[in-house]
Each structure stands twice: as structure tokens, then as C-alpha cells.
Image (cartoon, rainbow, N blue to C red):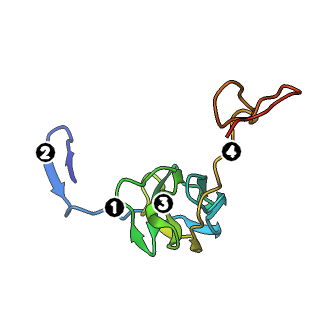
Amino acid sequence: MAVTAHKAGHPAVTASSAAVAVAKGVAPKAVKAPSMSGGIRVGVKTTAVPGTWSPAPTSFTYQWRANGVAIPGATGASYFSPASIVGKKLSVTVTAHRTGHRSASVTTAAYTVAKGFAPKATTAPYRTSGAEGFLSDGPSASMDV
């Protein structure tokens, strides 16, 4: 930084100081640890719950992990587990950011990914008539073999 002093009848004098680096503020700290909500199974939405931090972050970023290894492209607040990670331990690393401060990360506890639910019928089953090998809903149903 440079400062120049001026006084009538005197020459201008400039004084300079060495450059000073301003350190970033302390990183946010998790007061309540991040967690996950939803199902930990194939095809079910799992959502990262960022927890509570101090000082309050201005934003969060997420990285989902299978057996501790980052899952490429899985960086949203929610994740749908594919069949390829059945049996692996799912966790998410939450990174808290605060403008002018360092960032901090915490990884949730890991839970085993279960198989998905069996498909559900979208309509009730029904009987058809008139086709050989199928029963009819009629009172006198019969079948020639």
C-alpha cells in the first residue's frame, strides 16, 4: 500500500508498505452432523441432510460415495441408487462453503444399499375370454383339451 502526503510549501512524500495477505476466515464446523434421509435401496431417492453448521455456510456441495469411493457425476443433494451398487456402503460427503472462509467437509455414516422393491401392478389383474387356454368370466366356462 502506498500513501502520499502533501503540504503546501513542502515536497510530496510517498511511503509504501509491504504487501499483506489477508487470510481466509475459519471454516464452518458441523454442529449437527450431516445425515441421509429416504431409502437406501435401488431405485429409491436418498437425500443428503446437510446438518447444522457454525458459522452458517452460504452454500453446500455434495459427493455421493459407494464403499468410500466417489461416484462419478453423483454431486446433487439427492441420489437414486442403481442396481450396480447393491450391497455396497452408500455415504455422502457434504462440503460447507462460506464466502471469505475456508471450506470444510464431513462424510455421513455409510449404509448398505438394499435391492429395490418388487414392481407393482398398475391395474388389477383380470381374466380374458375367447382365447384358447384362458378362462372366461362367464358362468358356463369350459375348455376343450
Q: Residues within 10 Å of mark 4 (few under 14, many from 20)?
A: few
Q: Amino acid at mark 3?
A: Ala
Please tell me whether mark 4 or mark 2 is closer to you in this view.
4
Q: Residues within 10 Å of mark 2 (few under 14, many from 20)?
A: few
> Which residue is found at the position 36% from the left and 53% from the top?
73
Q: Amino acid at mark 4?
A: Lys
Residue 54 is drawn in which quadrant?
A: bottom right
- Give whichever of discs 4 and 1 has the lower sequence position: 1
Query: Which label was assigned to residue 12?
Result: 2
SS for callout 1: loop
Question: Mark 3 to mark 1: distance in Å?
Answer: 48 Å
From the top left corner, tell me how far across and down residue 56 is, in percent. Answer: 59, 55
- Give whichever of discs 4 and 2 has the lower sequence position: 2
Query: Which label was assigned to residue 83?
Result: 3
Question: Mark 4 to mark 2: distance in Å?
Answer: 86 Å
From the top left corner, tell me how far across and down residue 43 is, in percent. Answer: 56, 52
Q: Amino acid at mark 2?
A: Ala
Label 1 with label 2: CB-CB less than 8 Å: no
Please tell me whether mark 2 or mark 3 is closer to you in this view.
3
Residue 138 sits above or below residue 29 on the image: above
**Is residue 29 something that shows in the picture?**
yes
SS for callout 4: loop
Relative side of 70 to 81, left or right: left
- Give whichever of discs 1 and 2 has the lower sequence position: 2
Please tell me whether mark 4 or mark 1 is closer to you in this view.
4
SS for callout 2: loop
- Give whichever of discs 4 and 3 has the lower sequence position: 3
Residue bearing the label numbered 4:
120
**Is residue 25 something that shows in the picture?**
no
Residue bearing the label numbered 1:
22
**Count of numbered tags:** 4
